[in-house]
Image (tube, rainbow, N blue to C red):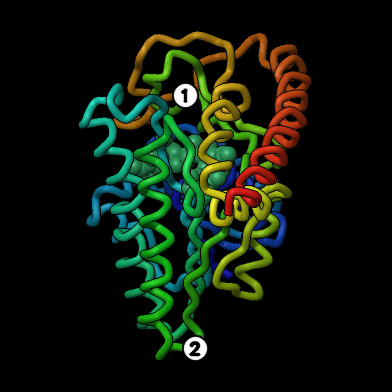
Amino acid sequence: MTVVITGASSGVGRAVALAYAEQGARLVLAARSRPPLEAVAQACREAGASFVRVAAADVNDPAAVDAIPDGEVDVWVHTAAVMAYGRFEDVPADVFNKVVETDLIGAANVARTALAVFRRQGRGVLIYGGSLLGTVVTPYTSSYVTSKWGLRALVRSLRLETRDAPDIHVCLVSPGSVDTPIYRTAANFAGRYGQPPPPVDSPEKVARAIVRCARKPRAVVTVGLANRIIQFGFVAMPPVYDALVGPLMRVGGLSREEVTPHEGNVFAPAPPPSDPEAASRRRRWARGATAAAVGAGVAGAALAVRYAASR
Ligand SMILES: NC(=O)c1ccc[n+]([C@@H]2O[C@H](COP(=O)([O-])OP(=O)(O)OC[C@H]3O[C@@H](n4cnc5c(N)ncnc54)[C@H](OP(=O)(O)O)[C@@H]3O)[C@@H](O)[C@H]2O)c1
């Protein structure tokens, strides 16, 4: 089996590569920066991959994306993405635009190449890394949220247009919070580093869901204990959701660690800034976040009762 992974050098993409390596798959690993890809490739060889090739490619460059596959592709997993924190008004226009370009137009570039290969073969599975933020909205992440909502629409369109090909599948695997470097590599104009709000899953858990989805394709898979509850609140009780999401984001989604405005890895690959106090901060934050979640639950219930009574 040949698996292409765009965004393979970090986080979920890296975990997907290792999961398929353990199954002895042939792998093509792509991202912009070559050195971290080479490190993942080496780990995949050691884990049992039958063949690994590395392709340094920016998903914003259609020709580079076209050059990634070099033969048959059974599964293409697309997890490449960038992110920017900050109020919409504080995020420079070029940063906003580049996040949308990478996360949405990049995904379309991948679809164009992958579907052309699949049409020739008459089969193939294309899996996109979506997000809970493709179904709900949080403040200070407008470019990312806009992209992920667009990505969900793109996947749905592609599914409609491949109905004539029963062995071609386009799927969306949407996690909630995952412990990956994206929170620190993100561009940041919020004054404080981002962090994954609880409950947090491992990239390996998301990778297992992706591998399962490739074996038995499903339109949408969500990963994350709280996703359904958050989606319910967003759709069924908008005033309650809107009152709570800002404070919760400030407590759970942004760390206390201050950061000067920067463009992160939006325009060029950049390793995550070192985080020497991560472990102790995570413990402090987990305690605070639990307290905040309990408080939010109580406040949410009270607001929900008021909302129901007012209707
Ligand atoms: N972490 C979370 O909490 C979370 C939650 C929900 C959904 N997701 C989604 O899950 C997927 C994976 O996220 P992650 O957290 O694993 O992110 P990550 O650790 O930051 O990895 C992102 C990967 O994308 C690559 N990439 C970025 N820009 C690229 C470009 N223009 N062209 C090609 N490759 C590019 C990066 O390598 P280079 O920089 O070298 O290019 C890296 O390999 C994304 O779609 C993300 O939106 C993540």
Q: Is residue 46 above or below residue 125?
A: above
Is the CB of mark 1 within 8 Å of ligand 1? Answer: no
Q: Amino acid at mark 2?
A: Pro
Camera-nearest residue between 122 and 2 = 122
Q: CA distance from mark 2 to mark 1?
A: 41 Å
Looking at marks 2 and 1 on the same chain, the residue that comes earlier in the sequence is marked by 2
**x, y percentage for residue 168?**
47, 80
Identify the element where label 2 is drawn: loop
Camera-nearest residue between 103 and 85 = 85
Identify the element where label 1 is drawn: loop
Q: Amino acid at mark 1?
A: Pro
Q: Residue at x 32, y 39 (%)?
A: 99
Q: Residue at x 68, y 51 (%)?
A: 229
Is the residue marked by circle 1 packed among few (<14), some (14-19), or many (20+) residues within 10 Å? some
For the N terminus, which image quadrant? bottom right
Task: Tell me the quarter of the picture where residue 289 sits.
Answer: top right
Could you say which disc has been placed on residue 271 in the image?
Answer: 1
Q: Residue at x 32, y 30 (%)?
A: 88
Is the CB of mark 2 within 8 Å of ligand 1? Answer: no
Residue position marked by numbered label 2 in the rendering: 166
Q: Which residue sits furthest front?
A: 310
Left or right side of 270 for 304: right
